[in-house]
Amino acid sequence: MSRAPVPIGVIGTGWWATQFHLPGLVSYNGAVVAALADPDPVKLDNAGSAFDVPAERRYQDYRDMLASGVVEGVVIAVPHVYHYEIARDALDAGVHVMLEKPMVLTATDAWDLVSRSESAGLHLVVGYTFQFTSPARRARELVQSGRIGEVNLVTGQFSSMVASYLLGRPGDYKDVFGFPLTGPGEGTYSDPAISGGGQGMTQVTHPMGMVFWVTGRRAVEVHAFMANHGASVDMVDAIAYRMDNGGLGTMASSGQIHPGQREFEHVIYHGSEGVVVQDLARGTLAVSFADGSEEATPELAGDDLYPATATARCLVDLIAGAPGAENLAPARPAAATVEFLEAAYQSAAKGSPVRIEP
């Protein structure tokens, strides 16, 4: 007997939820959007009407949604500063969670969510979309199987188009992203009190989340330099780090790519027996082994390149116990990413390296 569709609630009816999560859920056979929550009544009703959620299942207070008992899982897509409180309350209510990136803003809160989800036996998926691509899964397999030996260096670059977001001008990108129902708020990414930071929190979180997921490692020391270039948050970051196996790493990131300009987003894993080059912007993987053999994959496109609906659908499959369901964006590597970013901001502020305690 097939299972009934999984009832999912969506908390936050802003840009990302209405352009990706909600369309991905309403078009997925295993799910039903059972409820919405947003403190903004206009956004809430617009989303409810667009996605056929009854008025009585639209909540201005997400806690009323959690108390209603109508959802088994929630997708949380709200400004960064609110991630921890909402995810904590959902887990405490016995509800499975898909939480947008960055997971939270502090290491203490990140590891607290890991503990709560694991203790309660609840699924916690983090919004790292790139990890749901086939090259990402292959990179993880090659690295964690030991096929390229011990990873002693990881180098990365993530140069992307977010400058106007970080400057509080999201409308500059309307022609690029469309914003079919609503766009980001002016302060969502530009106000450090809301976002927790700029390029680091919004973009570096992607490749570093990938690094810690692929390698299974975490950082123990970080030295960062950051520049704002007219924004109230960081626009350009250069970060060096040491991993818990003694391996070293670098990550350089800029938000100053312009519309139509090529983006540069890659991670290179240097092992004692091979090198894996992962190009996130093109969805390719190129491997060179110490024995002279090589492996390469073709470029991806569309949803294969950036499966924006995969994170929310993954939550559905995990709850349903679907055959082969796997959490490809689990909480522990995401928490390692939070502690890395926290250390990076501390290092940039004080001008010296920061140790991350176990």
Image (cartoon, helix red, strand yellow):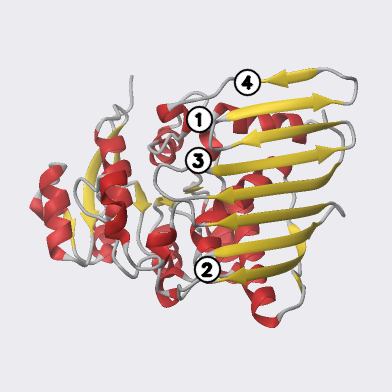
Point out the tag, 4 or 1, that comes first from the N-terminus.
4
The residue carrying mark 4 is 297
**In front here: 34 or 76?**
76
Q: Say which element carries label 2.
A: loop
Q: CA distance from mark 3 to mark 4?
A: 20 Å
Residue at 55% over, 68% down: 109
Q: Position of residue 180 (x, y in %)?
A: 20, 45
Q: How many marks?
A: 4
Circle 4 crowding by C-alpha within 10 Å: few under 14, some 14–19, many from 20: few
Residue furthest out toward the bottom: 350
Q: Are marks 3 and 2 in contact (CB under 8 Å)?
A: no
Q: Are marks 1 and 3 in contact (CB under 8 Å)?
A: no
Residue at mark 3:
262
Q: Circle 1 is placed at which residue position?
A: 325
Dot 1 or dot 3, earlier in sequence: 3
Observer-side mark, 3 or 2, equals 3
Q: Earlier in the sequence, mark 4 or mark 2?
A: 2
As helix, strand or loop, the secondary structure at mark 1 comes to loop
Is residue 219 shown above or below 352?
Answer: above
Q: Quadrant of the N terminus?
A: top left
Residue 105 is tagged as 2
